[in-house]
Image (cartoon, coloured by chain):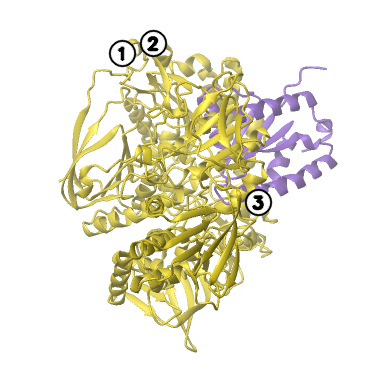
Chain colours: A purple, B yellow
Amino acid sequence: MSEHKPKIVALVCNWCTYTAADLAGTSRRDYPSEIRLVRLMCTGMIDSKYILKAFLEGADGVFIGGCHPGDCHYIDGNLKAVKRIEAIGIMLEQFGFEKERLKLEWIGASEGPEFQENMQEFAKKIGDMGKVQTADRMIL
Amino acid sequence: MDRKFSTLVAGAGISGVRAALDLAELGYRVLLIDKKASAGGILSQLDYQFPNDHCGMCRTLPMIDRNNGAQFCLRKGIFHKNITFMPGCEIETVKGTPGNLSISLKRSPLGVDPEKCTGCLSCESVCPVTVKEDFNGNLSQRKAIYLPVPHNIPNKRVIDFESCTKCGECVSECPTNAIDITKDVGIETIDGIGSVILATGTELYNPDGVDLYNTSKIKDVVTATAFERIMSSSGPYKGKIQRPSDGKEIKKVAFIQCVGSRNLMIGADYCSSVCCMFALKEAALLAEKTKSSDSAIFCMDLRTFSRDGERYKERVKEKGVRFIRSRIHSVEKDDSGNPSISYVDADGKQKSESFDLVVLSTGKSQNLTHPSFIENEGVFGISETPDFKEISDSMINSSFASSKAIQIAKEYDYETKKSSTQINDDDPKLHIILCSCGNLFKENVDLTKITEDISRIYGIGITTIDQACSLEGWSELKSIIDEKGVNRLIIGACNPQIFSTKLSDNSLLTEIITLAEHISDTESVDEATKSILSEIASSIGRLKKYTPQKVRSMNISKRALVLGGGISGLSSAKTLSDSGVPVTIVEKSDKLGGNLPFISDETVIKSIKNLIEKVSSDSNIDILFNSELSSHKGVPGKFESVISKENTELIVQTGSIIVATGGGKASFDDENERVKTTFDLSIELMEKKVDAKNIVMMQCKDSRVEPFNYCSRICCGKALDNAIKIKEQNPDAKITMFYRDIMAYGDIEKKYTEARRRGVIFKRFEKEKYPEVISNDNGFTIKAFDFILNEDIEIKADLLVYSTGVAPQVDNLEKTLKLKTTVDGFIKEVDFKFRPVDTGKEGIFICGLRRNPANASEAEKEGVSAAQRALRLLNSEILISSGQVAHVRHSICSRCNACVTACPYTARFVSVEDRKVYVDDISCQGCGTCASVCPNNATIIEGFEEKGILDSIEAALG
């Protein structure tokens, strides 16, 4: 099998996970370069379309990072995201994407190391899973 | 004369930040100082807070005029247009009169010029001095030149001159010549300041002094703050929960309470108020993080006197944490090197138990006093003495202080013009500025490739500046913006957040990229270049699609509605009226004062009567007696309330509503005249002697048990007052008080000591075993278990006094105003710690007993604090929208109302006139929940338009 370098998009909330990413950055905690961060204000803002778009654009994995329950700057946006992401997971499977390719994790603002760990872990898992099987069959 | 700052706030902990924001939000300029090199106070060391065991500090940030402040995690630092932060400063003297104070500040040199420092770390690597890092509870080490708070931005180094040897290594190593070790402490005088708020907090007790617990000898005995650092992922062990001596994972911890507090031996006759909750939280966190369950809290009382504290304690107990009633005398090492504690267990047996770690719940340092300039007129302290307060109390107290500062700022006309920046809505003209950050990015990134690719693919100009954070770099950046007529800017730099505040006044739209994140030791130059290119592309996508909306302004009804004429309502009304806001008070009964008849403290009575008089004679305040709120509609700034008053209805238009309907004694009925409540007894004692000889006081009657499972906070203090008064009248009276935990927080502890000194007997009982009362002809026999004698006892009494607690008013307001309540019926604030008087609905605030049990002075402060929050809306005649709010495209909206239900701020409503869905610009915080639930894409979030985000995602994967 040829070397497949996975592409991963991380949709992160401005208040917690982005801050954690920033902290990881400033404290020189590297995370895999194949991960691209897209900052949004809140995970509750994540439209199903964003996730589908990422997969359709060739992402091998989509990571979503938000505040811990009870921490959301916008009261409960993160909890609304949970339900939506669960639903999208089910949909993804029907289109031939393993639902593990979509992951939601709570990473608080001070959790730079957790951010790094999560990113490494997710990148490794997605790397091990290889290419999306249905990728070649998808028409954009 | 220079009159730049309306107020100087000394101390940049959470109290100081709150006070500074209160003023800044109303348009007053504030000078915020701290003696330390960074802002944040003790909270910068604490990652987690009760009751959700996480953070929430960002909720302190402004919600109206959001764009004046930075929109990111508050733990990183405080950035607001009207706040200037000066680290390393202390007040020396205060002279002059309010409105024109002259303040001399002692400025300690920081050693590093923040304008020049790039945070490159080269100074740290050459510094030969290594000292213990106090930020991490002395468990890790740092250099003499260091970053005071790891998560602060900008990440500028400072020098700790106490340990610096002035060897000069760093000076020659610094690539930007930012370091100067020759400066001395300087005195700087600032004139024309309106007032001073002293928010300097307190010092934590240092257990090394009287080293009862061997902190200096046993490494595994640490303070609570140090333990908090151990559990923090930015702490000394990077989140690995291990003990200092041998790195073993921590599973079983002993918390020793009241270290340095409640100790007459060292003259500490006070309770530090927060340590019990602190220990509970840490025990809960540890149980959660390590899945362990054998920790123990050694305490005399467990003072969970905040509204939700009791239930929280029970949750911690369910996690397996033990609460052991014992005052620990010493900590020794056992044979295997673990710290070990000897104590007497519940059965009276001597026991020795070893733990992985011992945590000392250190409270405030004793007998500190405020500096003498607190006496100067125009200087307001947040507390009477340097004190340790729970966060929500700190917030309320600091708003109380800032309300006084605002009066002065208003009187002496310090206000600045309110403005909201209109983002330039011409066709997007993008430009990219990359900072090469000395040599850092030149070496690690292929800047030429980035420049070529960007101009080739996107046709966008790109400039590299050598050091954008330096003064020269900044002016170069400004000239590029002007020359090229740029209205959309992407800045890539090492720590670009500083630009967002610097550029916030401009009408251009900025997107900021942290370049440092892309550079790593393990990745190649190619990888870093690719990753930066992708992020730039992603930002271009978002900025191109950004459609700025017109800044809108809204006229508001400059009047406040205060529901309830009790203590908190009166103080609210007074504060608002003093700030020039007309007030309507709606009072259910026919008089003001609320619980005044049940207060027995002469000074409090006097001050409430004074308040009633002032409010009654205030022409700016209308009072409607015998009336209630019957219905309500509208948006913040324009509420319309219907008040029913004796069969008539009248409509009041107000900009804001303050709920202060209070509460009162919990209902209690006993026919027997020898049975009284603590409240009734306190009133009786004001007038006459109690002739009973044997008095039994029973605390927590129908309180702290389901269904009233909360502590009423005030009964213990009142019962102690009663006991002392009876003893004063009749020293021979026998008083026995049955209690579960004496909630003598703060200085109430002194009363507890006094009562014991006067011979009041205290007997503890367990929740499950309320003492049994048998009444007979001569009085009562109380049967209980004595934990000291370890046997059942019987006590005879001829007067029985129950502490029955308080309950919130039943007024249905939660339904009328659609507010949330706790299980106990108190109206719930939106965030217990950080926004204690805000309800979830903008414009509606809550204070006093309707929110939580509180004594008169606490209720008064809450009232002022609520008024303070309302002033953000009512201070001026117009409100300006913040931008970055949601908009509805009515043509494609199917009016399914999904967004109305989803909005966490109830900012969306269906108009009665045209049945369309509208967004209230003031309430909307731009979280985007509505956009993601909309099935038709009818909602747009300014700045996060769907097309822009989709382009970003595409670019990120390109």
Q: Single out the mark in the foreground, 3 or 2.
A: 2
Query: What x and y, as percent, mark residue B589?
Result: 44, 80
- Local secondary structure at mark 2: loop
Q: Is residue B231 left or right of residue B66?
A: right
- Local secondary structure at mark 3: helix
Sequence-wise first label, 3 or 2: 2
Q: What's the amino acid at mark 2?
A: Pro
Determine whether B155 is above or below B895 in the image: above
- Local secondary structure at mark 1: loop
Residue A136 visible in the current orientation: yes
Residue at (67% x, 46% y) in the render: B318
Sequence-wise first label, 1 or 3: 1
Query: What x and y, as percent, mark residue B472?
Result: 32, 25
Query: What x and y, as percent, mark residue B525?
Result: 57, 15
Name the residue tied to disc 3: B932
Residue B128 badge:
2
Q: Are marks 1 and 3 on the same chain?
A: yes
| C-alpha gap between disc 1 and disc 3 | 58 Å
The residue nearer to you, when weighing B377 against B304, is: B304
| C-alpha gap between disc 3 and disc 2 | 54 Å
Q: Chain of mark 2?
A: B
Q: Chain of mark 3?
A: B
Q: Mark 2 and 1 residues: CB-CB less than 8 Å, in contact?
A: yes
Quadrant (top left/top right/bottom left/bottom right) for the C terminus of chain B: top right
Q: Single out the mark in the foreground, 1 or 3.
A: 1
The residue nearer to you, when weighing B418 against B591, is: B591
Query: What x and y, as percent, mark residue B522?
Result: 60, 15
The residue nearer to you, when weighing B848 against B945, is: B848
Residue at (53% x, 48% y) in the render: B547
Say which quarter of the image contains residue B248.
Answer: top right
Residue B165 badge:
1
Q: What's the amino acid at mark 3?
A: Ser
